[in-house]
Amino acid sequence: MSLASFSNAGFAPEDLNTSIINMWTRDEIHPAQFYRTGFETIFFNHNRQYALDCVLSSAVPADKEIVIAGQANLQEVVAGANRFDIPNLVFEATPEEISLVDAVLGKGTNVSHFVLVIEKDDDQIEKYINHLRPILSFKGIDLILYCTASVQSVNDRANGSVDYMIGGWNEFPDNSFVVARRNKLVQTEGNSRALNFDLYASWQWCLQGRGSNIAPMEM
């Protein structure tokens, strides 16, 4: 069985590649040079839920749990977590309420990842992140953004605190993508709970389209 047959990974058309970069950053970056930012893009010939499931299956260690927060579409993440038997805590909260998550997490947390569901492109993104960033950094919890709507420059607006971003396009419902911090992505090798949702294998398949002349990671 080839990597492509079980990962549903593919190569993004140029216009969608450009769209992914615009969703991620304000910087003008050629898609072929995006890896120099320290992040990798994985494109899927499948819907947004599939991309979410790949991240959950591969990034969350077997003995850890996640927190799912936001105001809408939280059940999509819950469904993915339950599919892989990942313990999860749902915290439906406005940006003003999200700071209460510190009490929810407690002192001896077993949470490895915080999944923030973004359902619209407005200043609530910054409000959520501003409250979350110091809490997650102190506790060593990775941040996953699950964007159910198109957003712009989300990592810039989050001050570089995003570890995984999951997104897609309403006009192309059968395509989706993950932007992942490379040093987090390499740790997912061999961790997937299901062969069909292996984020690391999907990344390796996408790397087949990269040239052999690798530039330094300077961006």
Image: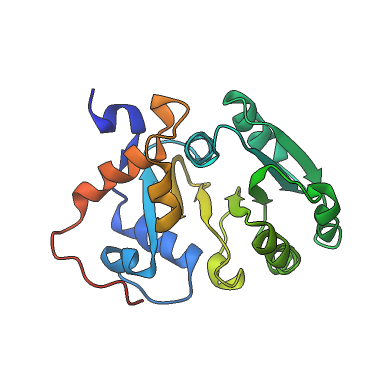
- Image quadrant holding the C terminus, namely bottom left
Indicate the position of residue 2 as horizontal and vertical percent values. 23, 28
**Colour option used:** rainbow
Above or below, comparing residue 49 to residue 97 in the picture: above
Residue drawn at 80 percent across, 61 percent down: 95
- Image quadrant holding the N terminus, namely top left
Farthest residue toward the front?
108
Indicate the position of residue 132 as horizontal and vertical percent values. 72, 62
Indicate the position of residue 67 as horizontal and vertical percent values. 71, 44
Above or below, comparing residue 194 to residue 218 in the picture: above
Farthest residue toward the left?
212
Between 98 and 176, the one nearer to me in the picture: 98
Indicate the position of residue 160 as horizontal and vertical percent values. 54, 69
Residue drawn at 37 percent across, 47 percent down: 43
Q: Is 217 positioned to the left or the right of 78 in the image?
A: left
Q: Is residue 183 visible?
A: yes
Q: Is 3 positioned to the left or the right of 197 in the image?
A: left
Residue drawn at 15 percent across, 59 percent down: 211
The number of discs equals 0
Q: Is 14 positioned to the left or the right of 146 in the image?
A: left
Residue drawn at 44 percent across, 25 percent down: 194
Q: Can residue 153 be seen in this view?
A: no
Residue 33 lies in quadrant: bottom left
